[in-house]
Image (cartoon, grey):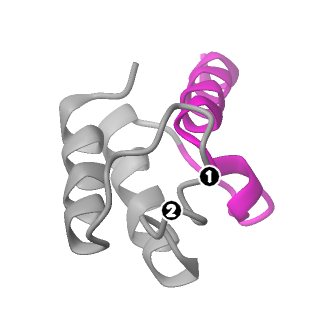
Amino acid sequence: MLSPSITNYLQQAAREARTEMPERTTSLFDAGLLDSFSLVEFVSLLEEEYGVRVSDAELKPSNFDTIAKIEAFVSQTKVADL
């Protein structure tokens, strides 16, 4: 499950896009919550919130396309950092 600050970020993006929060497996990019510009800001928030580091190679939309993918990415990255 995503932290409250990450969820709040996505909820705010949904309000700005005038849409509902998508399901866990719905594309955040297709829903208009993220784009190539906001992805960098979003990943910075993830790094700060979870204490993970996203490499340049990992900074691609496919890793952050859905809530489920974000949760999996953060879980994998946190385990790798241990």
**Quadrant for the C terminus in the image:** top right
- The residue labelled by disc 1 is 27
Classed neighbour count for the residue bearing mark 2: other residues with Cα under 10 Å, few (<14), some (14–19), many (≥20): some
* Near-viewer residue (50 or 63): 63
Q: Residue at x 22, y 73 (%)?
A: 16
* Near-viewer residue (11 or 76): 11
Amino acid residing under circle 1: Ser
Give the Cα distance between marks 2 and 1. 6 Å
Label 1 secondary element: loop
Residue with the most extreme right position: 57
Position of residue 14 measured from the top left corner of the image (x, y, whole percent): 29, 60
Q: Magenta segment range?
A: 53-82
Label 2 secondary element: loop
- Dominant SS in magenta: helix
* Near-viewer residue (19 or 5): 19
- The residue labelled by disc 2 is 31
Number of numbered discs: 2
Position of residue 19 measured from the top left corner of the image (x, y, whole percent): 32, 61
Q: Residue at x 40, y 36 (%)?
A: 51
Amino acid residing under circle 2: Ala
Labels 2 and 1 touching (C-beta < 8 A): yes
Position of residue 77 measured from the top left corner of the image (x, y, whole percent): 64, 30
Residue 37, above or below 51: below
Position of residue 80 measured from the top left corner of the image (x, y, whole percent): 70, 23
Q: Is residue 72 magenta?
A: yes
Residue 16, above or below 81: below
